[in-house]
């Protein structure tokens, strides 16, 4: 997958923003304590779509 601005100009950006807003810091690491279903509900997308986007973001790390 090519990494371009378009990659984030959609639901990926919204999901990434949501994850950023709900992260907690423990020592020197950040965590999101929400379940995939909670993330999907907050983003108004299906759980499978949330999972797909999360996996795509992890691959780009």
Image (tube, grey):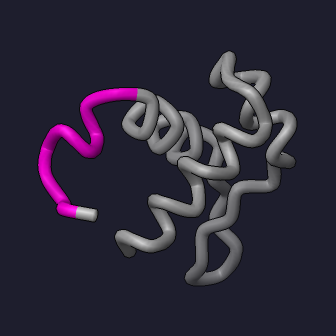
Q: Residue at x 45, y 60 (%)?
A: 57
Count the marks: how many?
0
Task: Return the residue nearer the eye: 19 or 59.
Answer: 59
> Residue 10, relative to residue 53: is it above or below?
above
Q: Which residue lies furthest to the front in this view?
A: 1
56 lies above or below 5: below
Where is residue 20? Give x, y as percent.
51, 46
Give how far across and how far down residue 17 sits, in percent.
Answer: 45, 37
Q: In this view, does 15 lie to the left or right of 12?
A: right
Which residue corresponds to the image point at 55% horizontal and 38% vertical from the top-left? 21
Question: Would residue 25 appear left or right of 34 to someone viewing this image?
Answer: left
| Helix, strand or loop: magenta stretch | loop
Quadrant holding the C terminus: bottom left
Place residue 39 in its image quadrant: top right
Compare residues 29 and 13 and report the one nearer the observer: 13
- Residue 38 position, x and y percent, is 83, 34
Q: Give the range drawn in magenta.
A: 2-10
Picture coordinates of residue 55 (x, y %)?
Answer: 58, 62
Q: Quadrant of the N terminus?
A: bottom left
- 4 left or right of 29 in image: left
Q: Which residue is drawn at 71% across and 23% down?
A: 42
**Camera-nearest residue between 38 and 47:** 47
């Amino acid at each position: 997958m090519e990494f371009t601005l378009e990659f984030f100009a959609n639901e990926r950006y919204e999901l990434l923003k949501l994850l950023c807003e709900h992260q907690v810091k423990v020592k020197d690491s950040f965590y999101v304590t929400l379940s995939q279903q909670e993330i999907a509900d907050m983003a108004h997308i299906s759980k499978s779509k949330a999972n797909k986007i999360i996996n795509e973001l992890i691959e780009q790390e």
